[in-house]
Amino acid sequence: MDVERIKADPKFGQALARQIGGWEGNPAPDAALTRLGGGDLHIADFHGKVLLLEVWFTGCPPCMQEAPVLESLDRELSARGLVIVGANADRILGLEYDDSARQRFIQEHHITYPVTNWTSEGDHAYGGISIFPTLFLMDRKGVIRDHWIGYVQLETLRKVIMGVLSEN
């Protein structure tokens, strides 16, 4: 396999760089997301806070495993400036789940952080996410500090988030 040729391909190389790495140290793209139940939320609205954005879909086993981890972090660290936003990708993926299924998931897992619908605009800005869950951690200046693909252990997330929260 010619890895350099793949990386040099304008379409595939850019997608590979954005999905696998290349996020850390870059400004977080702004995206408008629609909250379940109505109202818009913008990534840029969270400048001044530490934002953990999780892109997930209903029925995704690692996403379901990660929900209680994120809820635990939200309860523990929101007073220190952490905001968690769950962006559900069901519509982008063409899944048949409706808002009532997402609401049921939120209630069953006692999720209190904002949950939105992931949008085409957001998906494009964040490189066309294809592995779920995908998480982006942004600092108070709106710079992406870390990026994870797949389920992440609570202690791993806590350690990195605590480091970012301790910065001014």
Image (cartoon, rainbow, N blue to C red):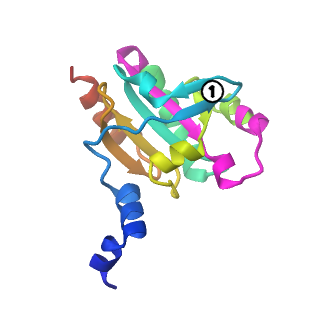
Q: Quadrant of the N terminus?
A: bottom left
Residue 154 position, x and y percent, is 41, 38
In the picture provided, is 137 more to the left or to the right than 111?
Answer: left
SS label for mark 1: loop
Residue 95 position, x and y percent, is 72, 52
Q: Residue at x 37, y 59 (%)?
A: 20
Q: Residue at x 52, y 29 (%)?
A: 71
In the picture provided, is 134 more to the left or to the right than 9?
Answer: right
Q: Which residues are magenta?
A: 77-103
Residue 166 position, x and y percent, is 23, 23
Q: Residue furthest left?
A: 168
In the picture provided, is 153 more to the left or to the right than 114?
Answer: left
Residue 134 position, x and y percent, is 47, 48
Q: Is residue 151 above or below residue 99?
A: below
The stretch drawn in magenta includes residue 16: no
> Could you say which is closer to the camera, residue 153 or residue 51?
51
Q: Residue at x 24, y 30 (%)?
A: 163
> Could you say which is closer to the camera, residue 26 or residue 56?
26
- Give the labeled residue for mark 1: 110
